[in-house]
Amino acid sequence: MKAADQLLEITLRINGEERQAKVEPYVTLQACLHHRLRFREVRYGCGEGVCGACMVLVDGQPMSSCLILAVQAEGRSIVTAEGLEPALGDHGLRQQLLSRQAFQCGYCSCGVLVTASHHVASEKNTTPAAVKAALSGNMCRCTGYQQMMEAALAASHQEPAPEIPFPRVDLQKKMSASAGYPTDQKVEAPLVGRILWTEYPSARIRYIDTSAARALPGVEAVFTYQDIPEQNCTGAVAFGHDQPLLAVGHVQTMADAVALVAARTEAAAAEALQLIEVSYELHTPTIDARTAIAPESSENVTAQFVQETGDVEAAFKTADVVVTGSYSNEINDHACMELEGGTAWIQDGILNIAVPHQTSESGQRAVSKMLGIPQDKVRIITHNIGGSFGKYAAFTIEGYLGLLAYLVKKPVRLVLGRDEILQRRSKRHPSYGDYRLALTKDGRMLALDASVLTDAGPYVGLTPAVAAVIGAEASASYEIPNVRMRVRGVLTNNLPTIPMRGYGSQQISFGVESIVEQAAHKLGMAPQELRKRNYKKTREDGWGRPMPGKDLWLTQTMDRVNELLGPPPACPAGWLHGRGVTTIHAKYGYPYGMVDRFVVRVGFNQDGRFRVESDISDSGTAVTNEMARLLATSMGVKDLPEYVQSRAAIDDPSGIAFAEGHCPSWFKSSLYRFTEWVQTTGAKGLLVITARIKYPRNMVRFQRIIVHPANFFIGLAGSLKSWMFPFSRESFQPRFGSSRSLSMCAAAVLDGVERLKKSVLQTASKALGSPTPELQMDSEGVHVANDRNRKLSWAALAQHAGGDITVVGESHNPPGPLLDPANGNQTGAIDFMDGSHGCDLLVRPDTGQVRILKYAAVHDVGHAFNPEALRGQILGGITMGIGQAISESMKIQQGRVLNAGLHDYLVATTLDLPEEVKVEILESGNGMGPYGSKGIGESGAVAAPIAVANALYDALGIQVETIPTTPEKLAAMADRGRTQQSAGAS
Amino acid sequence: MRYIRAEAVETAASAVAEGALPLAGGTILVPMIARCERQEQTFVDIGRLAELSRIETTNSSLLVGSMVPLDAIARTADAPALRALIQAAKAVGNPQVRRAGTIGGNVAAAVPTTDVYPALIALDAQITSLRGSLSENLPIDQFIPQGRLIVSIEVPNDSEAVSAFRKFAWRASAGITMANVAACLHIRAGKILASRIVVGGVSAHAQRLGQTEKLVTGRPASEWNQRLLQEAGATAAQEAVCDLPSPPSPEYRRRLIDAGVREVLSEILQI
């Protein structure tokens, strides 16, 4: 019997109410609850009971609803996260989680609520170990468990929840059914979209036969590249349009899509994929970046960064000690808890696409170009995102969804399976570096010589930006007078790449910190001592020039880490103890050679309600909430303003509609597009040319001829655009994201607040008949300074102004030349996140198992806007970083990823956490953000793998050369360590 | 796919005899079903059969219905003879997988990385199953799941037996097994009368390690020291067949077997 033939009627008791549903037998309880019965709080993460996002109580027991068929649950009592308090009683857990800001993207929150509520309700006065065990089936990728465990413990012990100044409205929503994630089904009964991926990483396609699939009942459409109306392109288009949406003639990576299917049921879609016949002629894939290029050739090189300061060779000749090493990072998956996908539908002639996206305007533009329809006929809807970490910095599956819904003219839902995400989608840039460090015998660093290859996959993507970060951060935290750096992005047949938490920084920091660590071992010097002797003392600008009066607090972070770690712990028999420390100095403000600008609209309406609007979506960094909070505190109002994702900012990048409230004229929008085209095309062309120039002889000569005038013209176009469109979104893609979000957003809000205050006082002055210096603002509105009775409320002020009072605020990173004329490199970062991490761990030499005992992280954040959210960012980075040091390895054979799910891609769980984690925040005020603040989001993930790797080196006597490592590799290293020791002893 | 909900053990058994797959805790089958990978298959839901969910303790054995969840087994009262099973049940998956996954499902699924099955072999468990209306009682390592509905598993609880289990996984929670070791020793008056030592997760089937058992049996418990433990570990590592193609390497799996055998024997013999 075919699946479609059987439809069963079931009755469930959900949150105390009887509900009926008709389901196919293969529909899981999760799918039935989420899609059919609209219990949106029951979310899908892994489909195999590993991640806990779909947890519900079934007859009182916390269960994964993805492991139960809906028909199996017939007659059972189900409680979702929304029904917990009535079912289990209110033990205060929800408030504890909220006020401890235990979540960021919040996708895991409802599952955590179910598990933790059950634990708190059934275990009075629970213990930390019991909480850890109870939550070990709930995965969180952002915040890293610590705060949720503290919340459960406090709720169980009936402690009061900590006070927070404003409620985290965003978290309240995420902890309920009303979050609105992109994979929530947005319309009734959409078609099921599926992608047919290539079977080989490198092959010519002889033919594609879709006739059998098209003839299958239940199949609405099957598309190949021939059906794409206009531009067949996807991916990050900042530096090239080389990634096809659907493969034409050949495939170059396992990430290439060959065909698209839309069907009425999951079963029909799955069967249709089987029936599409593709004939391949196989080629040998290039899978190793190190052998893909010849030493001095530019073949397969897609990005290049070269730099030499001082006289490196001379320094190496005079050095007392020279250490060399090769260090590499393998690929990581972002493993966002929410799957990649969404829904597309046409409404009122507009193609709506709900997908996760960090830069929705770039997605909108890509779809309009692909379909050949105006940009205002495409709308990307993206509010909350269940994790991003850079994955959605440039693109997601909007192209596939857009094509399906546009051609079929029916709503389509396309959500990739966890296996497809792991095996087919872009990853962190794997990198291979050779390092040489020269020092004096008293530990002064003289010279660093490094050559790094980074594997782009077959398409350029954002590789030039990543290569530039790797190059620009080569000297890391240290004052090194002579540095030679060469970074190349290499094309291979591996998976394509996209930035990931700490992109570029993690790769180069691991390399440099590893060679420094090796030097400390060779000199017999304490690693923290060697570091402290060489720290940079003052802040530098984007071009490496010191900024006087802006001292860095690197020494303070390291000293504090050592204090927090304290004396070494006892080491049980059969284990080896190791301690590792590291310091990072990683970018967060990165201009991509152009002005990075952020605009925000702030104001209030006739009801006196404040709001803040911008185009950014919430991927969990708390930034949308912080903007609202900052507006409230700066204006002195009591209620938290509403955050609105403004369509005007997304639909009209010129900023006219956003700032002035009307659409730009045809002429003005064309002018905007033209100047933008001059900028981006010029920039792209330049970067491609400079990447291809032969190294090193012809480099400098060509650079000067090309780069000087190009910089001038691109810069001129930029200045013109800024002058004509002061509130445009001017930046090279990806314009938004990374750790600079809050420093940019906060600055824009504060700029808006200044203008808003001016505007308010002008209106009040007219209405009250007093000059502005005599007026005062308070939480209710404006009054005359010496007469409190002559006052106007916010609502009255808005009415006097004829409606709302709103203004636009902006912030921008400083502009500079796109490329450095001396060497053709992209200009570097303009501000850095500083911090030190350290850990004590145990490793078993016979099995390679690792236990992290104690972890300490101290960050200089400049200024902390929300210390608890900040702590969550650092904890989340540590948790992810630990995974990337010792467990998150991809099993790859011939360009194919074998890891097919979260059971196999080893994201850290509560049981992998250090037994004790201490996070401290220092506020030097030396950042470039408002109040001297800095970014933070990525830095924890940059530092953590290095601290762990250095501790393993200390324990085993052999250095970790590749992260992530595995227990198997560690066991082999332990053997080598023993052999070395006995050789040394004899 | 076709779904049948069984209301009686007999109807479930006859459906299974006719080719239906029993659907128990769903931890292995439901992900496949949801991906529409088994569209031609009939599944018989045995989740409502109270007779299969009983757990009974007698003086000489533990009788576990096939639908008893691993979580319930993990919470069974500790007894030296049953320890390997309890430890194995605790080592499976994560809390929700242990609540859903059943002992019968674990045996029937026969995946190479199962933890409970090697423990049951070490404990010399007997399995009762129905082949249509025909009841069969077999030692667990002779059982073939095809066409049979598991009714119950009986684990001897001998006062002379002491057992232990170790698992090495890719991750502490919900980690796939790289190797596991289960051992059960019968000790009377300081003499090791018999031993059953089993490794799993390294080959398609769990294996008893005959040479290691021989080495262990016959030596007085009091003679055991670190050197003997090392000899037992090395023997086990050498005799085990490690031929799963997926990572980690066979060499590393042997290291884990070595460590696992040393650990379980050390726990049992209290060295």
Image (spheres, coloured by chain):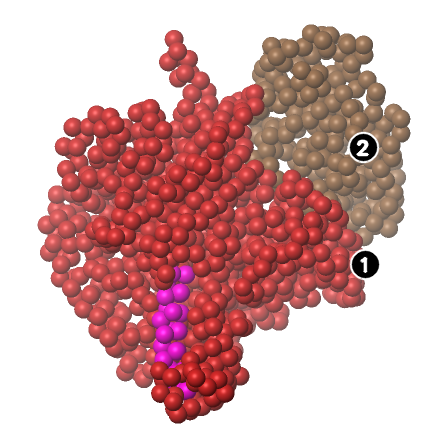
Chain colours: A red, B brown
Residue at 29% over, 35% down: A533
Q: Callout 2: residue from which chain?
A: B
Identified by mark 2, the residue type is Ala
Measuring from the top left, give residue A869's x and y in whole percent: 50, 56
Judged by its main secondary structure, the magenta piece is helix
Residue corresponding to mark 2: B77
Most foreground residue, A104 or B115? A104
**Circle 1 residues within 10 Å: few <14, some 14–19, many ≥20:** some
Residue A539 visible in image: yes
Q: Nearer the viewer, residue A54 or A909?
A: A909
| Mark linked to residue A75 | 1
Q: Which residues are magenta?
A: A742-764
List x then y, in percent, for residue A431.
Answer: 35, 41
Tell me what residue is drawn at x 74 percent, y 40 percent: B71
Q: Can you give x and y, in whole percent of width and height, for residue A975 in the image?
A: 46, 20
Task: Tell me which residue sits at (70%, 17%) in the image.
Answer: B270
Count neighbours of disc 2 (C-alpha within 10 A) and say few if under 14, some if 14 to 19, many if 20 or more: few
* Residue at 28%, 83% in the rendered image: A667
Q: Nearer the viewer, residue B19 or A540?
A: A540
Q: Nearer the viewer, mark 1 or mark 2?
A: 2
* Helix, strand or loop under label 2: loop
- Name above or below for residue A105 compared with residue A884: below
Q: Secondary structure at mark 1?
A: loop
Q: Would residue B256 appear left or right of A561 to someone viewing this image?
A: right
